[in-house]
Amino acid sequence: MNIANKLTLFRILLVPVFVILRRVGGPNMELASAFVFIIAAATDFLDGNLARKYNLVTTFGKFADPLADKILTVSAFILCAEEGLIPGWGVIIIVAREFIVTGLRVLAASEGITIAASFYGKLKTTFQLISIIALLFYPLWGTLPGRILFYVAVALTLISGWDYLAKNKAVLNLSDL
């Protein structure tokens, strides 16, 4: 197993640590959970860069890396919604978009087509991660910065979802309806 895949697995293993620390509660545990989230998010950027730079791209990595990202971000958004920091409807939009784009990618792969990450998809991911970090550190600066960033992330989620669907509508073969 190469270093990029080990980092992806490490990110997945950090999710329960993050969740447990967040659920234990108290200022110290909330702060610790925020730092665990930052470490996990950093592995996302690191594993992808290492895989591309050193040609460590594997089938496992193509599957596990986006899965690890979704597990991490969705877990954080659900916890933030549960804590009343963000509205649940926004989390539903984010989760629905992830299901739709993942389904589109699976369908495309069954046809031998690879759908690469788009500019809007990368921007969406960046804003999601930044909004989560701002929300996790809300005791330091309140919820307003995190909520604003969250709404931007929701908007980018909708835009990137539409972008993927528009650019790949041939994969859906809507003439079969």
Image: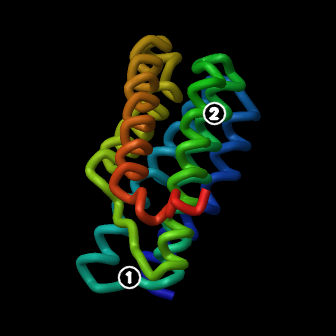
Q: In the image, what residue occupies the spot 65% across and 24% down? A: 88
From the viewer's side, name the closer residue of 117 and 78. Answer: 117
Q: Which residue is mark 2?
A: 92
Please report contact status of discs 1 and 2: CB closer than 8 Å, yes or no.
no
Left or right: 85, with 112 as reference point:
right
- Residue 24 lies, with reference to residue 161, above or below; the image says above
Quadrant in the rendering for residue 43: bottom left
Residue 52 seen in render: yes
Q: In the image, what residue occupies the spot 37% across and 34% down? A: 156
* Residue 6 x %, y %: 51, 76
Q: Crowdedness of circle 1 by 10 Å Cα count: few (<14), some, many (20+)?
A: some
Which residue type does callout 2 highlight?
Ile
Q: In the image, what residue occupies the spot 49% across and 14% down? A: 143
Image mark for residue 57:
1
From the viewer's side, name the closer residue of 24 and 121. Answer: 121
Left or right: 4, with 72 as reference point:
left
Which residue type does callout 1 highlight?
Val
Residue 68 seen in render: no
- Residue 15 lies, with reference to residue 96, above or below; the image says below
Q: In the image, what residue occupies the spot 50% across and 19% down? A: 138
Q: How is the image coloured?
A: rainbow
Q: How far separated are the C-alphas under marks 1 and 2?
A: 31 Å
Quadrant in the rendering for residue 67: bottom right
**Marked residue nearer the N-terminal end (1 or 2):** 1
* Residue 22 x %, y %: 67, 35
* Kind of element beneath mark 2: helix
Image mark for residue 143:
none
* Residue 61 x %, y %: 48, 76
Quadrant in the rendering for residue 50: bottom left
Q: How many marks?
A: 2
In the rendered image, the quadrant that contains the C terminus is bottom right
- Residue 51 lies, with reference to residue 172, above or below; the image says below
